[in-house]
Image (spheres, rainbow, N blue to C red):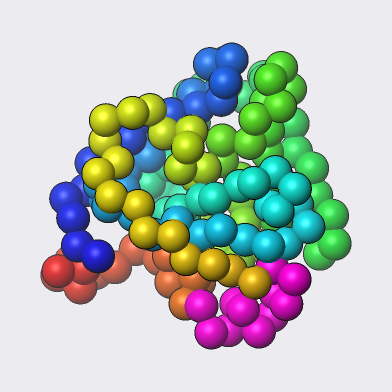
Amino acid sequence: MNSEVVMHNGGCHCKRVRWKVEAPSSVVVWQCSCSDCSMRGNTHFVVPSQKFELNEDAKQFLTTYTFGTHTAKHIFCKICGITSFYIPRSNPDGVAVTYKCVDPGTLKHVETRHFDGQNWESSYNRSGISACSKILPKGDDD
């Protein structure tokens, strides 16, 4: 899915947590069935951590929840409770951005893929999600 790379802005419901992320205008989002994502209804796209920038003022409003392997860092706003981004177990070197938390206007196309979080290891091995947080060398994304 090739598309132009743009700067997306977004954040939580109360607007205390704000960020920007450099990503394509067309993204692949992952709908995960793990116990946490399925309860929250989270659907996200993954970017390299270097492409994500949290507004400095937002840090005071964040808290983190972990469970299981404690690899995933479920980060959410202490005020409104929205998880607009988090560090996923599948990509601890990246950031998972909740696509519905992106401000309107910059996402042109969203393709949904399913990640079987109930059978995490086998889904991880066949999904290709681990590549989402890697920065491709120039020319490899064409």
Write down the quadrant of residue 102 in the picture: top left
Q: Is residue 50 above or below residue 91?
A: above
Asked if residue 60 is positioned above or below residue 112 in the image, the reply reads above
Q: Is residue 42 left or right of residue 141?
A: right
Q: Quadrant of residue 59?
A: top right
Identify the main secondary structure in magenta.
helix
Viewer-proximal residue, 138 or 124? 124
Residue 77, by quadrant, is top right
The answer to which of 29 and 85 lies nearer the viewer is 29
Q: Is residue 58 visible?
A: yes
Residue 37 shown in magenta: no
Residue 130 is situated, as x and y percent measured from the top left of the image, at 50, 71
Residue 75's x, y, as percent? 68, 38
- Location of the N terminus by quadrant is bottom left
Residue 40, percent from left and from top: 70, 43
Magenta stretch encompasses residue 122: yes
Left or right of 95? Residue 142 is: left
The part of the chain drawn in magenta is 117-127
